[in-house]
Image: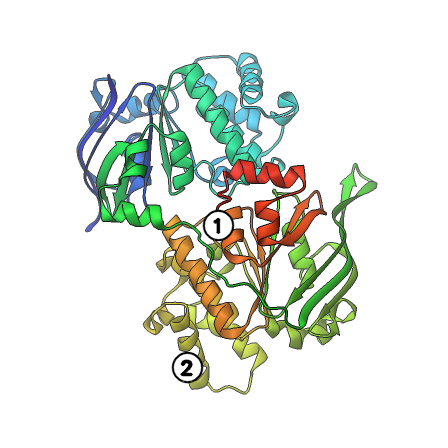
Amino acid sequence: MSLLTVRDLSVRFGRTAVVNRVNFDIAAGEKFALVGESGSGKTVSALQLMGMTPDANTTGSIVFGGRDIRLMSDAQLRTLRGKDIAMIFQEPMTALNPLFTIGNQIAEVLMLHEGLNARAAALRAVELLDKTGIPEPARRALSYPHQLSGGQRQRAMIAMALACKPKLLIADEPTTALDVTIQVQILELLNQLQRDEGMAILMITHDLNLVKRFADRVGVMQQGRLLEVADTATLFASPRETYTQQLLASHSKRMVSEHSDGSTLLEAKGVRCSFSIKQGWFKQREFVAVESLDLTLARGETLGIVGESGSGKSTLGMALLRLSVANTQGRVVFDGQAISEMSSAQLRPLRAQMQVVFQDPFASLSPRRTIEQTVGEGLALHQPHLSRSQLRSLVSQALSEVGLLPEMMSRYPHEFSGGQRQRIAIARALVLKPALILLDEPTSSLDVSVQYQVLELLAMLQKKYGIAYLFISHDLAVIRAMAHRVLVMKDGVVVESGTTSEVLSAPREAYTQRLLAAAEFSLAA
């Protein structure tokens, strides 16, 4: 029996059509997934189910429980949201209110929809947090969003969504950018809760591996159109549409050839990073993020650094480039020079040779600068003798190398897609022709096909210019595609290291084995 029926749904913002005559059904208790690249209309279609796009021009029908949601009044929609249909948003840090504790935010839903008093709602909030597997739920209920880890914030969002036992749960990219082990935990939690509560789930994602493991049926969207709908096994075994076939083929295959040992570019010995954490008014304690670590990196080589959140990956990467705010000890030698012993002024000329590409380009690119200003900033600083026309020519060349049109130089970051912004970030690093680039989760939030394109680009640039990469990631498929050697970190310590094939095909340590099992990593070459 159909719980939700969507017929001829079209959505326009001004003159732009973002959803075009979409049709699908979701049965009671069913797990249905909408997949596709960014901009395909997945999230906009889901928001229509809760009447959450008031500025859009919408046509078609959305029948839920026998009533057309599009014909409901604002008061009826407020009753519907959170009670009958609930939503888990992609980024809980922006969806949760930073001014209220987690417990208060869950209790608010219960007081509004269930009519519970404050005390009963607070107790129920703790029960819900416990049900989603958050340790010490009574204490965590008193925490603010910034005091929880990414996985805990996502569990808190799930607890809030489940507060009133909805008939339909919309999960919008619920595991994006989470560690593989946390992803598995969230999926297992959703599966268990779906069985216990008998609710239907609409999963919105670009992660095809997740879909394969979770969904009963799948709908594939492209440019606002629903191309095909099929049960999961059929779609993965014999996709009908060319676009679906391309999506399924966009997996991270091996993209780099084996590295022939060259001269050492970066060497670190005894690197230790620690932070001082306040304990009350006068006391402090030391938190060690990286514990006495050694590594080497050759020219033109990629060293993959993997591990869960909090393992010390990013802290280590920043410390190696002298960008960390941590108290750092140990010796770091770059291109024969001991940069760990240099002053900031002495180090500045070497900055051109050490560049960084961050995880979120939208946050790392200035919204007030054009792409020409952003990409050319490093050139203007490190090569002040260049004329304006020479600067413009080099920026144009860098954009062309990363697959962007030079005519785009006058645009601002918000005018580009996620994949294009990451290309801009790569161009900003590449324009200085560095010997080393630190890549900190550069593809974690990208669609699978865009991720594939960015990895191909990075592999091509490495081959062309002999750039060495420090590649930080929790995605083991990406590391297998790009890394020559791998370090596996846990709690600030390297638990295993070796060539990529050694570590990912025959891991010795239980922690590495657990990471591989969580990712369902393909061990076949």
- Percent across and percent down for residue 84 are 35, 20
The image position of residue 181, as x and y in percent, is 56, 36
Q: Are marks 2 and 1 in contact (CB under 8 Å)?
A: no
What amino acid does circle 1 point to?
A: Ala
- Is residue 237 visible from the viewing direction of this image? yes
Mark whose residue sits in front, 2 or 1: 1
Rendered view: 247 above or below 76: below
SS assignment at label 2? helix
Question: What whole-number distance in Å separates the C-alpha atoms at marks 2 and 1?
Answer: 42 Å
Give whichever of 474, 322 is nearer the camera.
Answer: 474
Q: Residue at x 76, y 46 (%)?
A: 288
| Amino acid tagged 2 | Ser
Q: Position of residue 421 (x, y in %)?
A: 42, 60
* Residue at the image position 67 percent from the left and 53 percent from the top: 315
Taking depth in this image into account, of 403 and 279 the one nearest to the observer is 403
Q: Which residue is mark 2?
A: 393
Q: Is residue 101 left or right of residue 191?
A: right
Corner quadrant of residue 302: bottom right
Q: Quadrant of the N terminus?
A: top left
Whether residue 265 is situated above or below residue 181 in the rendered picture: below
> Which residue lies at the image location 28% right of the left edge and 27% below the top edge?
74
User: Are there few (<14), some (14-19), or many (20+) residues within 10 Å of tag 1?
Assistant: few
> Furthest-right residue in view?
282
Q: Earlier in the sequence, mark 2 or mark 1?
A: 2
Q: Nearer the viewer, residue 481 or 268?
A: 481
Instruction: Answer yes or no: is residue 418 visible.
Output: no
User: Mark 1 = which residue?
Assistant: 525
Q: So how many labels did they put on this image?
A: 2
Q: Position of residue 274 (x, y in %)?
A: 76, 50
Q: Nearer the viewer, residue 143 or 325?
A: 325
Secondary structure beneath label 1:
loop
